[in-house]
Image (cartoon, helix red, strand yellow):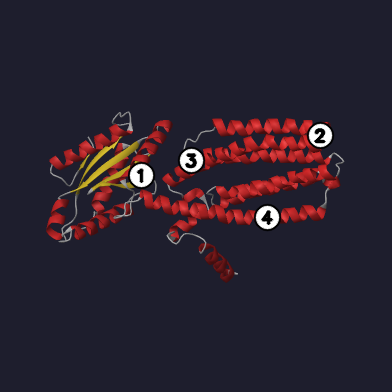
Amino acid sequence: MSKLSDFIAQRLVNFLPNELTTQELSQLLSPRQHPMLLSQRRSMMIVNRVRFFAMLFTLLTPLWGVIDIIVFEPSVWIKLALLRLVTTAAFAALSIYYRSNGSLFDAYRAITLLFLIPTLFYIASHSLLSGYDLSNLSAAVASGYAFLPFLLMAGLAIFPLSLAESILLSSTLLIAQCLAGYLSWSTLNWPSFAGGLWLLILIAGVTMLASASQLAFMITLIRQAIHDPLTGILSRGSGKEIINMQWAGAKRNNQPMALAFIDLDHFKEVNDSFGHEAGDTTLRQFSAALSKNLRDSDSLLRWGGEEFLIVMPSTNLDQALSALQRIQKAGFGSRPDGVPLTASIGLAERIADGLHDSEQLLALADNRMYQAKQAGRNRICAT
């Protein structure tokens, strides 16, 4: 059994980008291990695609009503028209008024609304039409309503979803299909229903693979865009987003947030004496040593040259100072000549320093870093 699962896993991996690392494969299974920036950008993409999908349904839903008028009796098409009117209004509201705030919960709510609206329409219309004795033409048109779950299932493929998210959404549509069959139990064509359900399950499998592939490409592209190519840690551009996001969360929840500004001491001498390649090696070793001693919730950024930032959410000034002293004691690695590498560190914290925005936090940490340099380097300045 293990060999079979390994074989299937290997075949699935072949459909994914070659640039995807082994650690990132777990991110395809569940969103729990997604980095903050990936979650934010994926949330915004999902909401934007939800709004686009809703706009299409807003335009297409009432157009089919013309066919209803042509083939159905007034007692039928009037009720269908009312259903379409309510459904179109719901799609329009979703398309026009829904906006992303960058949270994953916001994206889940948007995609839930997108699929809940047509699912309810499908169940209501299916129950309505099953209560009438339809002629050949009207029966053929009514059968078109049965294709709505297949359209919704295929529509999941446009979203970058993890396997767990795809299973949850696909299961919801399958349950809706079963519920529609249950509501028309007495007149249900079992062979046709079973065949349709099986086809819906097959489409769900293809959709899961398509969604996982989208997520895999997104993971790869975001990693390449937000990480510093030399050290592999977060770059300055993505660092600004992280600082702003952490600040917004800390302010919203009235939590502390610390920021450490680190500058390597006498790093210019390393480049001048040993060459830039040796300097690059030193930077990579420093980044690795620092990353090893940080919490999972902390973010290490390369701000430029030999300057680095540590973003420490939910951390007050005393806690941040204690953590930095522990990291400093563990060491930052060595210069090419074997001399221990040292750094000047400036520390600032949102609540303790009475700051009003993330720019002030960064400026104060930067200023204290220069104070540490002026005081003799190889020290931490937090006041």
Mark 1 residue type: Ser
Q: Regarding mark 1 in the picture, which secondary structure is present there?
A: helix
Is the residue under label 3 in contact with that under label 1 (CB below 8 Å)?
no
Say the numbered circle drawn on residue 44. Answer: 3
Q: Which of marks 2 and 3 is nearer the N terminus?
A: 3
Q: Name the residue under label 4.
A: 201
Q: What amino acid is at disc 4?
A: Ile
Q: Nearer the viewer, mark 2 or mark 4?
A: 2
- Secondary structure at badge 2 equals helix
x, y percent for residue 295: 36, 48
Instruction: Tell whether label 2 touches label 1 (CB within 8 Å).
Output: no
Residue 238 — which label?
Answer: 1
- Tell me the kind of residue under disc 2: Val
Q: Is residue 350 visible?
A: no
Residue density around tag 2, few if under 14, some if 14–19, many if 20 or more, within 10 Å: some
Asked if residue 213 lies left or right of residue 21, the reply is right
Q: Who comes first in sequence, dot 1 or dot 3? A: 3
Residue 267 image offset from top left, x and y in percent = 17, 52
Kindly identify which numbered label has been placed on residue 76. Answer: 2
Name the N-terminal-most of marks 1 and 2.
2
Q: Residue at x 30, y 37 (%)?
A: 317
Position in image of residue 7 (x %, y %)? 56, 69
Screen quadrant of the N terminus: bottom right
Residue found 21% across the figure and 36% down from its top: 367
Q: In this view, does 97 lie to the left or right of 19?
A: right
Residue at the image point whose x is 34% and y is 40% from the top: 240
Precedes in sequence: disc 4 or disc 3: 3
Residue 359, x across and y down, in percent: 30, 33
